Structure formats: C-alpha cells, structure tokens
C-alpha cells in the first residue's frame, strides 16, 4: 500500500501566496522549454444531459512530479468538479489527490503573471481587466506581484460585479482600482490588458491597443469562441502556452488563421521558450504582445506539487491508501 495525501479545498485555503504560485509556475514553464512533456486539453461532450468532461496532463522531471486536471461541468448537476491527481515522476506512486477548484484561479492567474513578467514592458503601470469573476480575480492577484501598477481599470457587463471587484481590490492593492463603463475605456492607454470572460465574441477592438501593449487572454479555449479579434492577433507577437494548442482550440488564433491575416509561422514561441530564454520575448517598446492561455498541465502540476510540499510541512491533509497494481490485481485470474 502507498499512503497518499488527500487535500480538500479547506486544507488548501491560504496555504500559498500568489507570488509562490507564480514562482512555481514560472519554473514549470522553464522545464517545458527543456522538454517537459505536456499536451493540450482533451474535452468530451454529452448532449443529454448536457455536460463536458475535460482532462490534461504534464510531467515536470526536475520538480519530480506529474499529473494534471480532470473536471466535469454540467451533467445535470449544474456545477463543476475539479480533481487533481499528483504522482511521483520517478516512482510513479501517487503523492496527493487535491480538490482542484480552489487552486484553479491562482494557478491560472500565475500563468498569466509569468507571461506578463516575460512579455510586458518593465515600466508597465496601467492595467485593464475585462471580466470580474474568480478567474479575473486570480489574474489580478498574481499579476500584481510582477509589476507595480498605479492604475487598474476593470470592466464587466454587469455594473454591480465590476464595482464590487474594484472596491475589493482598491482596498487590497496599492494601485487605484476603478470600475469603468466599457471595455474600450478600460483598454485605452493600458500597458497591460487581461481578458478573463465567458464571451464568445471579441471583447475589445484591436485597433484601440496602443503600441507596446501586452495582452493576456485566458477566458476561452474553444475553436469556435474567442475574446480577441483578428486585428489584435495580426498586430501582435503571438505566444501561446503550448504551440500545439494554437491550432487545436485557440479560437482567436484560429479565426485569424481562417481570415488569412496570419499563418502558423506567426506562432512566435511557446511561453516556456520565452521564459527560458530559448526564444526572445519583447524586442521593442512599441511591440504588441499576446499570451493566449487555454490552461495546461504545466501550471497545474507545478502548483499542485508546491501545495503538496507546503501541506506536508504544515501537517495539513488526510492520508489515504492506494494499492499498487501488483497487489490489487493478484488473484483476479483463477488458477487453472
């Protein structure tokens, strides 16, 4: 038997800071540049009852961990459930089983922050956030650890949501955080733009981006839905989390590809290559950059292992037992 740590959402609460998530995820993407295996998500759909089952995985050899995400949404429950299994990358033994929902905004936000750190101008101080849900919150918490923003503007379609978001972060951050009445007002003059929405159509006009802006888009991962218009993709140096995903489920890039304004050669590099210095990031103050984040096993495994280590040190979680296959399968085949 192998003892495996089970970590509930309560056990993970306030276990790590946004900066610790960012450090772990940055190192995960550095390992990706060194050949750490990862694949785009796989999604299965059912129509009656309507639902989606999604999974993705990665191996981080230097961290010594592998695993990923499995989650369901819908299927009559009207909710979603996130499960993160974590394994030892050398022995294959299960290390931990995490309730993945609570860490989701933080590990995804950390991926966005790593991209901002790698691609945004060093002097970036004005941030536009489009969206006001948990993912937008995770993005802002993490991104605020890599740049000193003075002015943060938030827009979402529901006035009350954007105002409560602004009030919350205005108290939390040193920056002035304010709600604005349109995405165009948010984006105008912004040094960094983050989109974290459920929109199926572009949420701002790419012509409104100032030279030198960095954009992180993380709200859509469907070939038929997009947050960014073709103008934004055409104007930008395009960096996805995984190059393979750009033509798999990155709706913004696929729409630009179909429109003929870009080719697959316009995929500049994966985020890991930029982080590791294998490929250049920003090359001028006037360059527009885009990080297209659809979610990968890289940030999931990196964050999960960091949480696992901290939980063990802090005495959190409950141990459960797993039987190795050599034991569990014994006796299943009757003797002749």
Image (cartoon, rainbow, N blue to C red):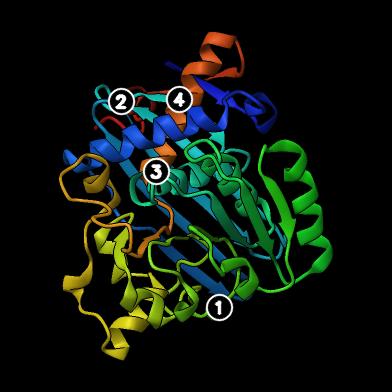
Mark 3 or mark 4, earlier in chain: 3
Mark 3 or mark 1, earlier in chain: 3
Question: CA–CA distance between discs 3 and 2?
Answer: 22 Å
**In what element is the residue under mark 1?**
loop
Residue that numbered label 1 is attached to: 200
Task: State the residue lying farthest toward the bottom.
Answer: 259
Question: CA–CA distance between discs 3 and 4?
Answer: 20 Å
Quadrant including the N terminus:
top left
Q: Is residue 48 rendered to the left or right of residue 313? A: right
Q: 10 Å neighbourhood of mark 1: few (<14), some, or many (≥20)? A: some
In front of the other: 154 or 53:
154
Q: Is residue 321 visible?
A: no
Establish if 213 lies above or below 265: above
Q: 10 Å neighbourhood of mark 4: few (<14), some, or many (≥20)? A: some
In the image, which is nearer the foreground, mark 3 or mark 4?
3
Which numbered circle lies on residue 174? none
Residue 105: image location, x then y, percent: 58, 46
Residue that numbered label 2 is attached to: 63
Q: 10 Å neighbourhood of mark 3: few (<14), some, or many (≥20)? A: some
Q: Is residue 223 visible?
A: yes
Residue that numbered label 3 is attached to: 117
**In what element is the residue under mark 4?**
helix
Residue that numbered label 4 is attached to: 306
Q: Residue at (60%, 52%) from the top-left corner?
A: 135
In the image, which is nearer the foreground, mark 3 or mark 2?
3
**In what element is the residue under mark 3?**
helix
């Amino acid at each position: 038997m192998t003892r495996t740590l089970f970590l509930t959402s309560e056990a993970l609460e306030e276990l790590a800071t946004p900066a610790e998530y960012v450090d772990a995820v940055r190192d995960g993407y550095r390992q990706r540049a060194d050949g750490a295996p990862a694949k785009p998500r796989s999604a299965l759909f059912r129509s009656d009852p309507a639902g989606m089952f999604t999974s993705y995985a990665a191996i981080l050899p230097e961290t010594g961990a592998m695993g990923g995400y499995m989650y369901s949404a819908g299927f009559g429950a009207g909710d979603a459930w996130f499960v993160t299994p974590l394994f030892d990358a050398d022995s294959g033994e299960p290390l931990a089983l995490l309730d993945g929902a609570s860490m989701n905004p933080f590990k995804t936000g950390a991926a966005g922050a790593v991209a901002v750190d790698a691609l945004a101008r060093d002097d970036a101080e004005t941030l536009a956030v489009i969206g006001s849900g948990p993912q937008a919150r995770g993005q802002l918490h993490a991104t605020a650890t890599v740049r000193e923003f003075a002015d943060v503007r938030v827009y979402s379609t529901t006035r009350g949501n954007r105002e409560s978001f602004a009030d919350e972060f205005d108290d939390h951050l040193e920056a002035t955080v304010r709600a604005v009445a349109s995405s165009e007002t948010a984006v105008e003059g912004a040094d960094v733009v983050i989109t974290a929405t459920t929109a199926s159509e572009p949420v701002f006009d790419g012509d409104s981006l100032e030279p030198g802006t960095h954009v992180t888009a993380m709200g859509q991962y469907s070939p038929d839905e997009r947050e960014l218009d073709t103008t934004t993709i055409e104007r930008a140096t395009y960096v996805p989390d995984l190059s393979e995903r750009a033509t798999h489920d990155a709706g913004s890039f696929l729409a630009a590809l179909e429109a003929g304004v870009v080719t697959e050669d316009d995929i500049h590099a994966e985020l890991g290559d930029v982080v590791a210095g294998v490929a250049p990031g920003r090359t001028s103050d006037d360059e527009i950059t885009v990080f297209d984040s659809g979610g990968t096993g890289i940030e999931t495994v990196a964050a999960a292992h960091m949480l696992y280590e901290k939980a063990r040190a802090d005495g959190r979680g409950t141990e459960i037992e797993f039987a190795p296959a050599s034991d569990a399968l014994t006796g299943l085949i009757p003797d002749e």
